[in-house]
Amino acid sequence: MTEAPEVGISDAEITHLIVRHLAEVRAAPLDAIQTELEQGGGDLEIDSKQGQVVAILIEIELDREGLIRIEDQVSDNLTSVSSLQRLISRRLAGHRGGG
C-alpha cells in the first residue's frame, strides 16, 4: 500500500490533480481540459457537482478522509479550478496541522 503524501504538495500539483480528475469526470481528454484552462487565463469554471466529485477523488487519492468538509461543499468553493485549488490547499494545511 502506498503511504499518503506528507507535507509539500504545491499549489501547482493540486491544480494538476484537479485538472486530471476533472478530465476523468467529464470523460474528456486531459489535453482538452488543459487547453480550456490555458484559454481561461489559468482558471476554468466547472459545475459544482463536478467539483464535488473531483474533490472526493482527490481526497481518496491523497488518502485524506474528511479533507473536504460538509461546510466546504458550497458553490463558491466548487465552481472553478482556482477556488477548488484554494480550498484543497487550505484544508491540506489544516489537515497536516491536525485541524
Image (tube, grey):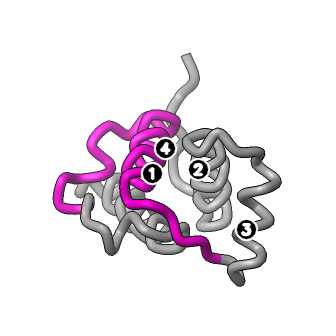
- First in sequence, mark 4 or 1: give its number: 1
Q: Residue at the spot x=64%, y=55% of the render?
A: 19
Distance Cα–Cα, label 4 vs label 1? 12 Å
Task: For the residues labelled 4 and 1, say whether their Cβ atoms are less than 8 Å apart.
Answer: no
Label 2 element class: helix
Please tell me how many numbered marks the rendered image carries: 4
How packed mark 4 is, by other alpha carbons closer than 10 Å (few <14, some 14-19, many 20 or more), is many
For the residue pair 98 and 86, the one nearer the viewer reads as 86
**Residue 95 screen position, x and y as percent:** 33, 53
* First to last magenta residue range: 43-72
Q: Are marks 2 and 1 in contact (CB under 8 Å)?
A: yes
Check disc 3 and report its element: helix, strand or loop: helix
Nearer to us of marks 4 and 3 is 3
Left or right of 90: which side holds 19? Answer: right
Q: Mark 3 sits on what residue?
A: 36
Three-letter residue code for mark 4: Ile
The residue identified by callout 1 is 50
Whether label 3 touches label 1, CB < 8 Å: no
Of callouts 2 and 4, the N-terminal one: 2
Q: Which amino acid does label 3 sit on?
A: Glu
Under tag 1, what secondary structure?
A: helix
